[in-house]
Image (cartoon, rainbow, N blue to C red):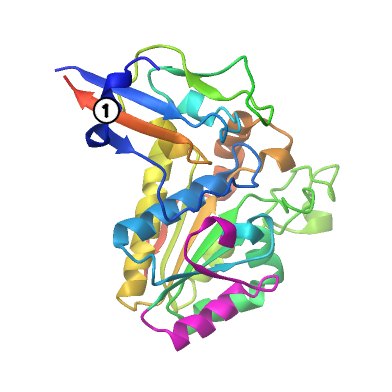
Amino acid sequence: MAIKGEVVIDKERCKGCGVCVVACPNKVLALAKNVNGKGYNYSEAIIDNCIGCASCAMVCPDGVITVYKVKL
Amino acid sequence: MFNPDIIKPENLVYKRTDVLTQAVMHYCPGCGHGTTHRIIAEVIEEMGIQDKAICVAPVGCSVLAYNYFNVDSLGAAHGRAPAIATAIQRLYPDRYTFTYQGDGDLAAIGTAETIHACNRGENIVIVFINNGIYGMTGGQMAPTTLIGMKTATSPYGRTVELNGYPLQITELLAELPGTYYVTRQSVQTAAAVRKTKKAIRQAFENQKNKKGTSFVEVVSNCNSGWKMTPVQANKWMEENMFVKYPIGDIKVDGQKVK
């Protein structure tokens, strides 16, 4: 049974602290090269390896991450 | 986005709770205040007490907490949040009054109010954020600042000769007979956040059962005050703060944990 996850990041609210990047066990997240409206390098998913564990969402101080998971 | 087809309400694992307002928090990037706000709001949502919870906001970084919690709130004078919470809880015994205070507020200016509210065993929840510094005013030394730690008012590091010892107020409060539940947690990793959430849930459950004062200390970072990146600050906190402020329960069910 495979598990597929997906994170949706509200990039305009993200402050680019990078706490989610180190919290992710599968190294899915990274800070973007682009900046959002406030000038922060927002967090984004760079590889399709998410398992929907919500560790990133748990540590996000601004609650910008929404997590979805499906068992295939 | 790699799998847009799984973004459906039935696959939702985690979303920001509605007990937090949509206001963007003014905290610095990576600050533990935001995480702690979020988990308090999640506990309030899980217990279904949004219309009965009352937040008492302190003075300090979290002075604007009432803008973020979608519950009834009150702003207290500096350090006086436990006194205000005492009054609210005595007038409305069926409500869930909690104070949210930093270390400058609770352990310096409000020491008297904190100690006496805990000693009376008021049926309130106190959430105490300990980051070892006065964050809002520009990183001055607080009672909880570690020995050797550089701040704006101790530029060569805190020394015992000049500034005395860091105050472990949580251990101090655990000695008082009025406190029912005293614990120290942190919010730097997902596992730590889950534990802290459990502790805050326990505190509100104690309040529901009218057990006495519940005190939850959250050891947090202050990356701006410590002059570090958020990730570095979390690592520094684990290496230095946890030595002086060890994580774990100190008093459970009115009995000190040995």
Q: Residue at x 43, y 31 (%)?
A: A56
Q: Residue at x 36, y 14 (%)?
A: B2
Type of amino acid under label 1: Lys
Above or below, comparing residue B69 to residue B92 in the picture? above
Q: Residue at x 53, y 30 (%)?
A: A19
- Residue beneath disc 1: A69
Q: Quadrant of residue B116?
A: bottom right
**Chain holding disc 1:** A
Q: Position of residue B76 (x, y in %)?
A: 64, 73
Above or below, comparing residue B74 to residue B19 in the picture? below
Q: Which residues are magenta?
A: B66-94
Left or right of B90? Residue A12 is right
Label 1, secondary structure: give it.
strand
Left or right of A67? Residue A22 is right
Residue B100 seen in this snapshot: yes
User: Which residue is more in the foreground, A28 or B69?
Assistant: B69
Q: Is residue B133 found inside the magenta-colored segment of the image?
A: no
Q: Position of residue A46 (x, y in %)?
A: 46, 13
Q: Position of residue B129 (x, y in %)?
A: 57, 55
Left or right of B14? Residue B135 is right
**Label 1 neighbour load within 10 Å: few <14, some 14-19, many 20+:** many
